Amino acid sequence: MGVDTKVDEKDVEGMDRIKRYMEKFESEKVAVSYSGGVDSSLVAYAAKEIADAVTIKSEFAPDYVIDEAKEFAEKFGMRHKILNISLLDDEMKNNPTNRCYLCKKRIIEEIKDLGYNIIMDGTNADDLDEDRPGLKAKEEGDIISPLADLGLGKREIRRIMADVDEKVARKPSESCLATRIPFNSEVTLERLKRIEKAEELIRSIGLSLVRVRDHFPVARIEVSRDEFDKVLGAEDLVSELKRLGYKFVIVDVRGER
């Protein structure tokens, strides 16, 4: 299903509101926690005159996500820093139910260690209504969320972004590779790389959004329901996934969630 990216007068005003919001931080040392997703891209773009965009490169981030973040930053002349860190410490390897909190807290600490006194992120107004463990780390770290503060939700943000970069405005929501692994099941570099390769294989047949849930040796594929036929019609896909080590490959009939 396509995303409505038609820009109207309200959306143009929305960008002006975001940029005016940024003015109060002109004298601060500001970083935007920039993943390359729609929300953080909008914040990084609006703040590019006063802030550095900082992208975390870790075992949890697919390579193509980092590449797309770099591409957008270069296109619009953003000051972009890529911070290489390892998130696979003993606690994270155990994949506890508070993994997202621990991960977000670590990322905030790493960015603060670079000397920034203000950190912004892409949390939006709709996120506040969802169960997101990372929000607790954000509050503890005094992270500023311009989009949420301005009451902007996902739909408005995509419309505003379409006036900046329509390709980015249409990007599907992303989540880190660790989210594909059940809680309390060990996270290893081998497992993360297997998931990344599996999703890359499936995207190569023309799918827009893919999740491979790793219940090793079972791969549970989640795609949009209107793309089921593409997966089921890819004759070599199962054999390719089995070459990665999976013994069983299933498609979740509930679709991507």
Image (cartoon, rainbow, N blue to C red):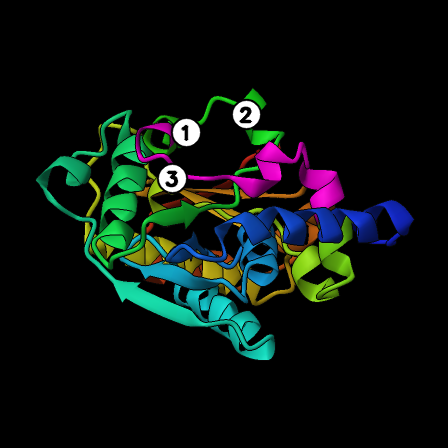
Lower sequence index among marks 2 and 1: 2
* x, y percent for residue 105: 27, 38
The residue that mark 3 highlights is 179
Quarter of the image where the C terminus is located: top right
- Answer few, some or many: residues within 10 Å of disc 2's Cα (few below 14, many 20 plus, some between 14 and 19): few
- Is residue 245 something one can see in this rendering? no
* x, y percent for residue 19: 65, 54
| Residue 254 picture quarter | top right
The residue that mark 2 highlights is 128
Rendered residue at 55%/35% (across/down): 252
Residue type (three-letter) at the residue carrying disc 3 = Thr
Where disc 2 sits, the SS reads: helix
Q: CA distance from mark 1 to mark 3?
A: 16 Å
- Answer few, some or many: residues within 10 Å of disc 3's Cα (few below 14, many 20 plus, some between 14 and 19): some
Left or right: 85 in relation to 225: left
- Answer few, some or many: residues within 10 Å of disc 1's Cα (few below 14, many 20 plus, some between 14 and 19): some
Q: CA distance from mark 2 to mark 1?
A: 8 Å
* x, y percent for residue 249: 44, 45
Q: CB under 8 Å between callouts 2 and 3? A: no
Camera-side residue: 116 or 177?
A: 116
- Is residue 61 something one can see in this rendering? yes
The residue that mark 1 highlights is 135
